[in-house]
Amino acid sequence: MKRVFVGPLLHLVYRPWVRGAENVPAEGAAILASNHLAVIDSFFLPLVLDREIVFIGKQEYFTGRGLKGRLTAGFMRGVGTIPVDRGGGKASEAALRTGLKRLREGGLFGIYPEGTRSPDGRLYRGKTGIARLALESGAPVVPLAMVGTDVAQPLGRKIPKVMRIGVVIGEPLDFSRYRGMENDRFILRSVTDEIMYAIMSLSGQEYVDVYAATQKARIATGHPAADEAGQLPDAPGGRPRPDVQVPVPPEDGPSASVG
């Protein structure tokens, strides 16, 4: 469905561009770790890759009623989204099982380490589930940055604005040196911070060392944002902030295409 119907239409309208596509392994398992700016992130990333990638999505996307519900479910399946029950304490376990199964089959598995969309376009603290997935599977982690999806589809907007969407893909990260240490919370945090730093270096986003879900909850309840004191580190793991800018699309280059 994605390639036959959805892909050509999105290519024609949004002209997505990509840098670093060669960093995605041509075969074998790999974890693609991305920032998360909008719902459409999961639609555009598969368009610029030659290989199939799957994501997990909340089960509510697949259980809606009526025509709208059926269309949403069909579209999510078409772009490679796997439904996962994210309720209660089962959320991280279900996501881990789904990811491990996909990776053991030698496929690509996409994950958003922030756990939810950014409330304001900044990059938030990564959850350590991605580190556990990497260490248990042994698969490399390919960091990447979605560019412009938050402008095309800000929070509350259903139909994305027509503009060019970009994807910047970094070199794979190898964490085999930590094999067997997936139960060490300090190792998990260190690996997660390394992945988030790589994403930040690709995206040029400002970093907030707070979970995005925490920030959203504070905003929703009228409390001050958790970073307003200005005492948080400028980059994951307390590293110096990388001297990078938000990527811009090529001036005259053609849009990315897949075979």
Image: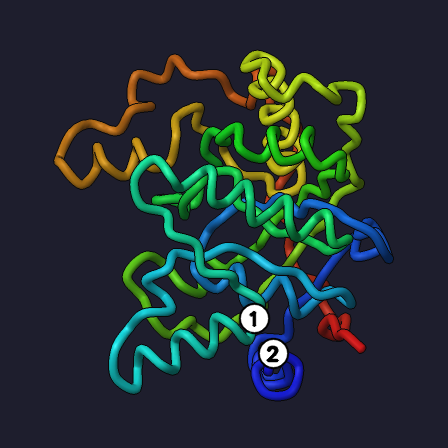
Front-most of 19 and 64? Answer: 64
> What element does badge 1 sit on?
loop
Q: Are marks 1 and 2 in contact (CB under 8 Å)?
A: yes
> What element does badge 2 sit on?
helix
Residue pictured at 41% horizontal, 48% vertical:
117
Whether residue 9 sits left or right of residue 72 in the image: it is right
Relative image position of residue 245 (x, y in whole percent): 62, 40
Q: Is residue 54 visible?
A: yes
Residue pictured at 71% horizontal, 39% vertical:
141
Amino acid beneath label 1 = Val
Front-most of 222 and 102? Answer: 102
Relative image position of residue 44 (x, y in whole percent): 58, 66
Q: Quadrant of residue 195?
A: top right
- 4 shown above or below 75: below
Front-most of 87 and 216? Answer: 87
- 71 shown above or below 167: below
Q: Would you name the residue on which mark 2 appears?
A: 2
Mark closer to the chain start, 1 or 2: 2
Residue pictured at 57% horizontal, 75% vertical:
14
Whether residue 20 sits left or right of residue 97 in the image: it is right
Residue furthest to the left in view is 222
Q: Quadrant of the C terminus?
A: bottom right
Amino acid beneath label 2 = Lys
- 214 shown above or below 104: above
- 12 shown above or below 217: below
Q: Is residue 238 visible?
A: no
Pointer 1: residues within 10 angstroms few (<14), some, or many (20+)? many
Q: Quadrant of residue 161?
A: bottom left
Q: Quadrant of the N terminus?
A: bottom right
Q: Would you name the residue on which mark 1 appears?
A: 79
